[in-house]
Image: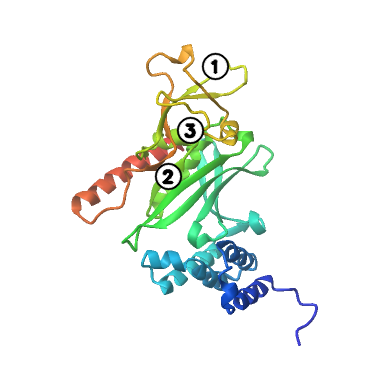
Amino acid sequence: KKNEQDPISWHKLALEILEDIESQSDMAKSITDQTYNSIISACGKEKAWEAASLVASKASNSIISSNNIDSSENDEQTSSYFSNLDTFHKNGRGNDAWWEIAEYKSGERSIIVGIQPHRNPKRNGMSLVFYRDDLEGNRVKVGRLLLKNDRIPSSKEFYFSSIIGMEVNSRVRGEGLSKVLVAIWLDICLQTECFPRAAMMNKPLISLVLSKFGFIPDDGGCKCVLVRLEDDDDEHTFGLYSPQKSLDGALSHRVLRIQNIKLLRMLPESSRQKGAGAEVVIKTTFRHPHKPPDGNRDSDEEVQVERILLKDKINAAL
């Protein structure tokens, strides 16, 4: 008989409930992604990586079949993903846990880089989190990048790493950290043989940073001009104007507030001279010239050239 003083194993209880639901055909249809995500989270908190792997496999069966990925291969990859975290130093607990993977020098200060898995890491990848020590020696979070990693179709070697969004701590905004954090992500992409791209981007400042690293907007976006406002009564730092169409409703109030941007119906007099402001494209995805080789010699050489050019941009930003 089980000792009544033993702590409850929540992930085992969750697995038992899942199996009970799956055994009842009328209830099995009620299982959703959120169901699987909650169980995977419970497994992760108790370091039950093999169990998490099995649940993640169940959750992604439809995706596996549509991409012709063998389920046994998926099980192995997911289990490996979880267990590999144990090779890194863990910080924090629960949803705030992150694993320290690297340290970069930026100017005279160091930035600690960590990975923080999403609730369903096999499907959704991870976030990169960034910390540094303040003047008192306390480690503080300066930002994070939201990423999604996808295997490139018809390839067993290469992955896309897509930036979905970026957050910079409000206390350190204005220090140019956006460019530094993107540079670190791109350097990790080069080291891990991932190829960078960007999901639908609605934040003008992130689009601007991506353009500085050579990202190319895909078709369908909205071309805008981003200008720095010198004398604004509302204390906005940037203004955004589109010669194509009105931007009313194009960006959420949250994005405008966080990025300190004011929508303009026309450019300020001081910004109308040729070359004033920076061109950005929003509401579209981005690709990068550093792309996977297609197997022929010219393509392989092109990849190496683009890799060198990207590395130069990364070094200049750090």
Instruction: Give me the disc on residue 230.
Output: 1
**Residue identified by numbered label 3:** 204
Asked whether the beta carbons under mark 1 and mark 2 sit within 8 Å of each other, the answer is no
Residue 149 drawn at (x, y percent):
44, 55
Q: CA distance from mark 1 to mark 2?
A: 31 Å
Q: Secondary structure at mark 3?
A: helix
Circle 2: element type: strand
Q: Earlier in the sequence, mark 2 or mark 3?
A: 2
Callout 2 amino acid: Ala
Q: Residue at the location (28% across, 47% down)?
A: 304
Marking on residue 198: 2
Residue 196 in the image, given as x and y percentages of width and height: 39, 47
Q: Secondary structure at mark 1?
A: loop
> In the rendered structure, which amino acid carries the disc numbered 1?
Glu
**Residue 185 picture location, percent across and down:** 46, 46
Residue at 51%, 38% in the rendered image: 106
Q: Quadrant of the N terminus?
A: bottom right
Horizontally, is 238 left or right of 150 in the view? right
- Answer few, some or many: residues within 10 Å of disc 3's Cα (few below 14, many 20 plus, some between 14 and 19): many
Determine whether 35 is above or below 161 in the image.
below
Is residue 238 positioned above or below 231 on the image? below
Q: Tell me, for residue 166, which label it has, or none.
A: none
